[in-house]
Amino acid sequence: MTNNHNDHKNPTERGVTIWFTGLSGAGKSTISEKLEAHLRTAGKKVEVLDGDVVRTNLSKGLGFSKEDRDTNIRRIGFVSKLLTRNGVAVLVAAISPYRDVRDEVRQSIGDFVEIYVHCPIEELTRRDVKGLYAKALRGELPNFTGVSDPYEEPLHPEVTVHTDSESVDESVAKVIAKLEEMGYLASKKAAAGARR
């Protein structure tokens, strides 16, 4: 499902929500920051909605029950929808552990590209400077996604990046290629042809 009013615009004017989901520390924010720079260079209007920042501002007071997590994701989805329909590329970096609410947001927005930022728990634990995974694995942190709380992997993401085996640039390149293929970004070939 796509928003028809968005279909006939040139790629720089088409709004889209690019939704990065994955466990804490997998690389969602890092990849979205690098992608943001690329999209701005390509002439797109860009907003970044980072899960941690949103929780501080838009979702202050929410806890980590399934209901509160879903409310948080619905709020991010609502803001994303408003921005997307106004031609903005919205980069969302949020764990968003539950599949049903991610799918609900996808349906609501239409122009939606899901990026699964995959990284094994062993690697996340090794990288984790705060030691949160180790604490969660010892049972000291309740409601920790992927350890003591569920994380439901996307079944059909548009892109899966593997941050344990790919560089940030490789992951970003995969996302850019998909955005070009879906018509949200002008491909380099098309741009080069237009300049001739």
Image (cartoon, rainbow, N blue to C red):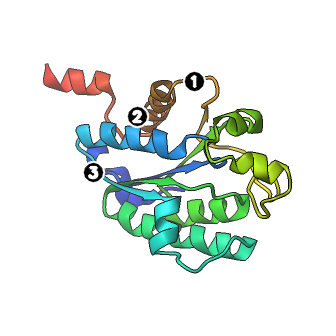
Tag 1's secondary structure?
A: loop
Amino acid type indicated by mark 2: Glu
Horizontal and vertical percent position of residue 48: 39, 55
Q: Which residue is drawn at 40% across and 34% down?
A: 180
Binning the other alpha carbons within 10 Å of mark 1 as few (below 14), some (14 to 19) or many (20 upward) gives few
Q: Nearer the viewer, mark 1 or mark 2?
A: 1
Name the one closer to the observer, 166 or 63.
Answer: 63
CA gap, disc 1 to disc 3? 30 Å
Tag 3's secondary structure?
A: helix
Name the one closer to the observer, 33 or 192.
Answer: 33
Assess whether mark 2 and mark 3 are in contact (beta carbons under 8 angstroms): no
Q: Determine if residue 10 is in view.
A: no
Q: Compared to 129, does 61 lie above or below?
A: below
Q: Residue furthest left?
A: 196
Point out the tag, 3 or 2, that comes first from the N-terminus. 3
Amino acid type indicated by mark 3: Glu
Quadrant of the image occupied by residue 176: top left
Q: Mark 2 points at which residue?
A: 180
Amino acid type indicated by mark 1: Glu
Q: Which mark is residue 166?
A: 1
Image label count: 3
Q: Which mark is residue 13?
A: 3
Position of residue 117 in the picture relative to residue 185 (left or right): right
Horizontal and vertical percent position of residue 196: 13, 19
CA gap, disc 3 to disc 2? 13 Å
Assess whether mark 2 and mark 1 are in contact (beta carbons under 8 angstroms): no
Image quadrant holding the N terminus, namely: bottom right
Q: Residue at x 53, y 75 (%)?
A: 59
Binning the other alpha carbons within 10 Å of mark 2 as few (below 14), some (14 to 19) or many (20 upward) gives some
Binning the other alpha carbons within 10 Å of mark 3 as few (below 14), some (14 to 19) or many (20 upward) gives some
Tag 2's secondary structure?
A: helix
CA gap, disc 1 to disc 2? 20 Å
